Amino acid sequence: MDGHAVRTVAGKWMLAMTALAGLAGGCPAPSYVEPGRMERGLVVVLPGIEGTSAFNAMVAEGLAAGNIKYAIEIYDWTAHWNPVLNLQDEVANRRKASELAGRIAAYQDAYPGRPVFLVGQSGGGAIAVWTAEAMPEGHAVEGVVLLAAALSPGYRLDKALGHSRRGIVSFYSAGDWVLLSVGTRVFTTMDGQHSESAGRDGFASPPTEAYQKLYQIGWDSSMVSAGHIGLHLTSGAGEFVQYYVAPLILCGRWDSEVTGRVARGEWIDPRQYPAAAASAPAASAPGTR
């Protein structure tokens, strides 16, 4: 297949995703930002390059179904109607991430000690990383969860890891080759590289102290029962988020034991992994599948 044909195929997939997002966008996004939730903590859901749609509404619903009692906010960072422009406009995207970091810092000042988590899918994964990077001095997020992140595998996460108390958990899938291999090779990753994305094969992991807080979970066939079949959009399936992402937020700490159990699809009792008093989740454990 020549370069023109590759661009044509990738472009059609991008347009198809946009059409799906447009159809899904008619569904009202769930609201989980009432005062009682805000007083417990905050989870910010960052959409992909399509912007607010039923895809990210499913992420929010999955978190709520997983007994996350924090406020859950979908933050639409996109600036263009064309998803390719949202993918490629790094200057505008970093500006939106910086604005979000300021909002999070203001929330933390108003609600001292409450945990803040970032959950970014696809292009939203880059916004999550850049938001962590941009946190003002004296502020940090509790943790970052990436679902099929559209960043290049070699993107350095040191600063984001340093501004996240628990670190970063990145879910990736080798089956996500259409959008995160062909698509980003043609149209670029969020950080402007014509390469496959870390959401397909994982991030490079240099042996530094900061990277000890990077936990990567590859797709496994056990995830099919929760709706994630290894493709790009299913990384945000509601049941997958409920059973694989919510337990991470409920647990008081992240380490290889916790992420290993999540990767194997094991149910986790968050009471076995308590947090410090200031960050303890005010939520019960989700039920088993």
Image (spheres, rainbow, N blue to C red):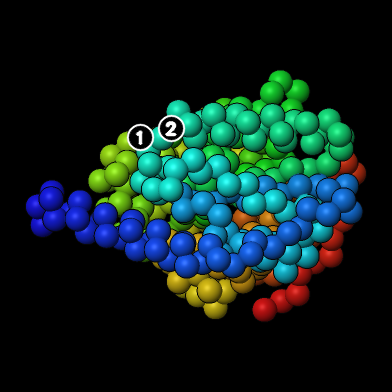
Which residue sits at x=64%, y=35%? 100
Q: Which mark is residue 90?
A: 2
| Place of residue 78 in the rendered image (x, y in percent of width and height, measured from the top left) | 51, 43
Left or right of 159: which side holds 218? left
* Front one among 22 and 12: 22
Left or right of 69: which side holds 136? left
Left or right of 67: which side holds 243? left
Give residue 195's quadrant in the image.
top left
Q: Secondary structure at mark 2?
A: helix
Which residue sits at x=39%, y=48%? 82
Q: Which mark is residue 192?
A: 1
| Place of residue 5 in the rendered image (x, y in percent of width and height, measured from the top left) | 14, 55
Which residue sits at x=71%, y=76%? 288
Which of discs 2 and 1 lies nearer the camera? The answer is 2
| Place of residue 55 in the rendered image (x, y in percent of width and height, measured from the top left) | 54, 63
Q: Is residue 224 above or below residue 11?
A: below
Q: How many marks?
A: 2
